[in-house]
Image (cartoon, rainbow, N blue to C red):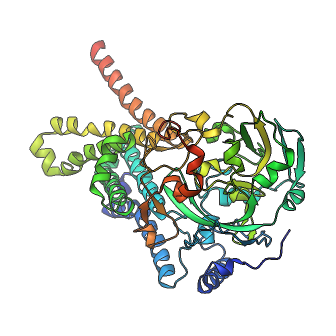
Amino acid sequence: MSRLSDLRYSDVTPQSIYVNRRRFLATAAAAAGAIAGPFSGQGRAAALTGAKSAFSTTEKPTPQQVITSYNNYYEFGTGKDEPVRNAPKWKVPAPWTVQIGGAVAKPKTLDLDAILKLAPLEERIYRHRCVEGWSIVVPWIGFSLSALLKQVEPTAKAKYVAFETYYDPKAMLSAREAGIPFPYKEGLRVDEAMHPLTLLSMGLYGETLPNQNGAPLRLVIPWKYGFKSIKSINKITFTEKQPDTAWATYAPNEYGFYSNVNPKRDHPRWSQASENRLGEGFLGKGTRRPTEMFNGYAAQVAGLYNGMDLMRNY
Amino acid sequence: MPKILASKWTKAAVFLVCLAPAGYLLALGGLEYRAQVQGIGQPGNLTGDPIKYITHFTGDWTLRFLLLTLAVTPLRKLLNQPQLARYRRMIGLYAFFYGCVHLMIWMGLDKEFAGAELWKDILERWYITVGMASLLGMLPLAVTSTAGWIRRMGFVKWQRLHRLVYGCAALGVIHYYLLVKSDIRLPLLYGAILAVLLSYRFAVRRRKAGAVAAR
């Protein structure tokens, strides 16, 4: 699965940090049993690299161990430290297939290997803002989702795209336990889905995605709150009507279909004006920063919402 | 058993056990600090979001100690161990202690003492309003927890005031229920335990009232 490339994660992470990280990982492995946990989900990843992208931010990527040990993946536990413990036990079905249909001329079911051949892999360093008020910077590996969606030739009827996460009731929480409907569903307008920033990601930090981050492939929509970036996708459907999405179904007054990052539009239970950047500062002290409209991607995406009232269409 | 419960050493031991969660948190913080000094960055002992972890950890223990305080009287009566009453004040004060740490972490570490934003949150966010009310309600109880205050107020009045703890515990559970996103299992568990502890008191009262009426 790996590709030749001129950019490795050593290019974006200072050597001292990753050397230290490796030393720490080695120590941690040696001292197994002392404090088990944070990294138990790592170790099965394969190398996966991509070419530098003009879409990348110059901000410093969040340490890998934070990105891979602090996840919202409700199927594997509703606490953010749970997926790193539970998800690695899940065996990703092989071959992984993605069924693409609905309002399209050529419905297709593609497996992961075929998808990986559709476009050259890129490394895109994106800001990622969670609706809960924290943010990270992630060096994703992948390519624009449009490369995949073009394969099925959407018809004129296709206005929206619905996505679904693989659901295995034996390995995952029940909808009742998690409190939200499963299989997890998300959706985008077709123009949002086809936007070059919308990324289909198969890796991060130069490696394939860990299970807790949405292996083997997921969306990354950097100008929307994190829950829009659906994980472990196995079904994509083009639709005429706006599809149901998990969180908006659960609490429509709290989560909308669009869920664009918007510092002016507070969540009913917390402010969205600022965020804590994870992985910085002792105990996270002094990491609060103002949140930017469209998470700082307004120049690229504001045009998609011309004339729309974003306070109502949240 | 009564002898052990009456011992001052047992009381000292319980004091230390109640301090253990705080000690555990400090130890994790120490590990993080050492890692920081050594330039390793965050090893993740407090998860990727230490502020949230510490906030939830101290909030959890506030609720647990509140429920434990309310469990003392039923246990004392059901097990017929009057000496258990000696521990109630200490456990209650620990609830207040963890609650105060919880509040300080939120105000200082999370919101960085941004006055305007704090006020906005307290007034606009229901779960914060309710949590603040719960902690504020515990303040007079903590202040009047000494033997001196019981004497000054008279036991009947003092006891009436201290029934405020039922409300504080209920508000604490509601605070938790309101803030979780969708997985309500733990708040419901705390709520169920609280319901059992309060129904016990209700049942005892009814039985007493019944006994009086039957006379």
From the viewer's side, name the closer residue of A19 and B133: A19
Specify the farthest residue to the top. B214
- Residue A128, compared with residue A33, is above or below; it is above
From the viewer's side, name the closer residue of B95 and B28: B28
Residue A229 placement, left or right of A299: right
From the viewer's side, name the closer residue of A261 and A73: A261
Q: What residue lies at 55% left-to-right and 57% top-to-bottom? A: A299
Specify the farthest residue to the left. B152
- Residue B126, compared with residue A3, is above or below; it is above
The image shows residue B65 at horizontal and vertical percentages of 39, 50
Residue B153 placement, left or right of A70: left
Could one spot residue B169 in this view of the protein? no
Q: What residue lies at 49% left-to-right and 79% top-to-bottom? A: B36
Could one spot residue A68 in this view of the protein? yes
From the viewer's side, name the closer residue of A271 and B141: A271
How many marks can you see?
0
The image shows residue B86 at horizontal and vertical percentages of 29, 51
Tell me the quarter of the picture where residue A183 sits.
top right
The image shows residue A306 at horizontal and vertical percentages of 55, 43
Quarter containing the C terminus of chain B: top left
Residue A43 placement, left or right of A24: right
The image shows residue A111 at horizontal and vertical percentages of 89, 53
Residue B29 placement, left or right of B66: right
Q: What residue lies at 73% left-to-right and 40% top-to-bottom? A: A162
